Image (tube, coloured by chain):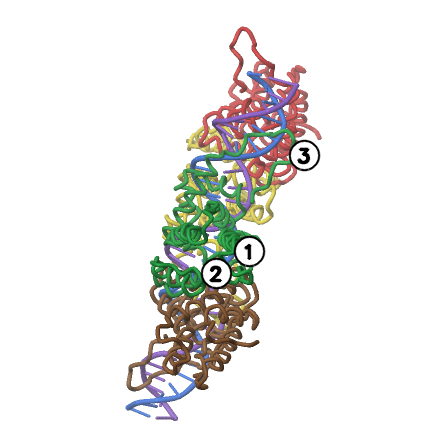
Chain colours: A green, B brown, C yellow, D red, E purple, F blue
Amino acid sequence: MQYSNSRTTQRGRPRSAEADDKILSATLDLVSEVGIHRMSMDVLAARAGVSKTTIYRRWPSKEALVIHALSASIRPFDHVDTGSLQKDLDLYLGELVQRFKPGPANDILPHLIETANLDASVRSALDEFVKIRRLPLHTILERAKDRGELDQNADTGLLVDCIIGPITYRRLLTREPVDTDFMNRLLALVLPSLDRDS
Amino acid sequence: MQYSNSRTTQRGRPRSAEADDKILSATLDLVSEVGIHRMSMDVLAARAGVSKTTIYRRWPSKEALVIHALSASIRPFDHVDTGSLQKDLDLYLGELVQRFKPGPANDILPHLIETANLDASVRSALDEFVKIRRLPLHTILERAKDRGELDQNADTGLLVDCIIGPITYRRLLTREPVDTDFMNRLLALVLPSLDRDS
Amino acid sequence: MQYSNSRTTQRGRPRSAEADDKILSATLDLVSEVGIHRMSMDVLAARAGVSKTTIYRRWPSKEALVIHALSASIRPFDHVDTGSLQKDLDLYLGELVQRFKPGPANDILPHLIETANLDASVRSALDEFVKIRRLPLHTILERAKDRGELDQNADTGLLVDCIIGPITYRRLLTREPVDTDFMNRLLALVLPSLDRDS
Amino acid sequence: MQYSNSRTTQRGRPRSAEADDKILSATLDLVSEVGIHRMSMDVLAARAGVSKTTIYRRWPSKEALVIHALSASIRPFDHVDTGSLQKDLDLYLGELVQRFKPGPANDILPHLIETANLDASVRSALDEFVKIRRLPLHTILERAKDRGELDQNADTGLLVDCIIGPITYRRLLTREPVDTDFMNRLLALVLPSLDRDS
DNA sequence: AGTTAAGCGAGACGGTACGTCGTGTCTTGTG
DNA sequence: CACAAGACACGACGTACCGTCTCGCTTAACT
């Protein structure tokens, strides 16, 4: 996101890493409190204890800042490999549900989606976001296929769509709860072979 | 959406119906061109060939106008009842895919989702939007259950989530195509009893 | 200074004359309090009870506003014609000394002079300012010449320079007082024929 | 103007004399090109090929730098003493007219005048400037008085005002030329005893 | 036919935020 | 130490947008 310094020798006063941190965390805070639109750069600067100049030196616009802040707040999923599809899914989905709880990263998702239509950099940030959620699940399913826990013809891509899709849909549109019960019913439908008990 | 005139006798010059049309269609145009945020009311007024007064006389805010414009552009689904689950689904899903094509109503969805967090009227507009899409499918599935085409224990609500959810997810997040092939694979997964050929 | 409306029919809401007044007088106040440079447009707007938009709709820049405000604050001198050079001078110079007292119009003069070098509109405002002070004195002297109170060969232009020049010089550069005593000594030097008693 | 180094032993790298020169001459250039207000310290530093640190190590503010630069460019008048008032005046006024030609030192004068109201150091710089011009003329007149070329009751202070005043006034306000012709007419008016021929 | 209440276009207005620029200070690495 | 480079806090600038307002003019329905 931020241009790297290609010069061999670093000249001038270096950018304050602390300022970066303060700006990014203040951004996440404010965005979750009042939303992107109602977050003002003056208030942000005051909150972060930083001048507007310092913000605009790093990001060309409010939009770009927010995107960066949110992208940076996306932690990759822990690698999961228990040897059992059932257990892998429990771990992954537990984490996924956790992340779908209300909070800045989720309340902002719709905004990203919208602007992604118009701005390529937002688009790629969003792609990254999506990938980070899909990839672990895809890997879990592929490994299960290798182990024979899943039919060799199973369409893992489609399965991912059918697990993450409904969850996302509930979260964003119907606002019905995404809880353990729902998860179980969902898995029973799209992965009947799993035969879960709970 | 628009406050009705409760007065028995209409006094003064009546509102121009032409103005309504010009405003609404200019709104749809602009929103799809530049997005809600970047659409300014001054530009909108100029584009519609109408004064700002005329707009604000009809809607209390930009937000309300956009919601109305988009709501108005949502046609309810035709009632579908062929007596066969397979045929009903073909018709409904054909229409659904049609509506998921890029266009203002869809590109705007994310914005509505975001604003819904903060504004109750947007929230209810969004609920209506969601309902219009879920209801016909739910009805189709319930009727199939009545006819015995579906297991009596089938969780129709979950089925709706698992059909509309993945489609929405693809449309908004992964941007992979939502075509007939995908539909068939999806149905084969969540409604295996259907045993489609294609 | 402000463009006149050439349209026959006045369209839209007319500019508030009250706003004009409030802005101009607040400008004069602030400029005299803190000087042009330290006067901020935000503070000015607040002081005038007006929004910045309203100011910038009327003048393109802070500079232009200040010039206009000061130009507008220059009252022409009352017409003086007592029939006696001595009495005419007393009246005119009394008024002149009055106007040279510390206050916005004078503290600002140097700023105008400086910017006049670079900006033609400032230049013409300054010319007007100068003219308003020279003209009455020139007229008084010419009339005295007609009446024979002054030598027919008297160089009235030069006399004006030699009366206003030293006063201005004292006011701006040496800061010595410009009082009645100084006036009398000055007149005795450049208009010895007057033979004043005081 | 520049704080002197009171340390007995000079430690570390000595200040670059070249930097001083480059800064001062760049200041004069820029001030005459765009005026004090529009001269930015960043641009100045770039133009002088020097860093801002180096400038601010020498002068505490932009104002102080400009004053210093201009003061330094004011050469004292050559001592004039021909033994004849007429000839002394010719020499002095010739030099004065020369110095009143357009150029940085003059175009900047108004700025100094204005700032002098607010800043004591500017005030004293301006006083110095004024003194440098008045003193030689005052001396010339006093000597003439001693020699009997001028009346013993002549008010030399007033005479200085009446010579420099009109010239300054023309230069700054009316912008009429200050040439030999004007000088002669001026002297004929305020020093009639001189009885010049030209 | 005249009155009258409301609609309408034009554009001014208050308020809020934006992103930029200028000053003077500070913090690096290099001579 | 001086110096170059450039980051930083602070504060002002001039612009854009929203939603309200105030004009003069127009349009029907009601008297």
Reading the image, the residue beneath label 2 is B37
User: Which-is-in-front pick, marks 3 and 1?
Assistant: 1
In percent of width and height, residue A38 lies at 40, 54
Q: Residues within 10 Å of mark 3 (few under 14, many from 20)?
A: few
How far separated are the C-alphas under marks 3 and 1?
A: 72 Å
Image quarter of the N terminus of chain A: top right
Reading the image, the residue beneath label 3 is D179
- Asked whether the residues under marks 3 and 1 belong to the same chain, the reply is no
Q: For this rendering, which residue is in front, B95 or D175? A: B95
Chain of the residue under the numbered disc 2 shown in the image: B
How far separated are the C-alphas under marks 3 and 2?
A: 65 Å
Reading the image, the residue beneath label 1 is A123
Chain of the residue under the numbered disc 1 shown in the image: A
Mark 3 in CB contact with mark 1 (< 8 angstroms): no
User: Which-is-in-front pick, marks 3 and 2?
Assistant: 2
Q: For this rendering, which residue is in front, A149 or A48? A: A149
How far separated are the C-alphas under marks 2 and 1?
A: 17 Å
Q: Quadrant of residue C40?
A: top left
In percent of width and height, residue A26 lies at 41, 43
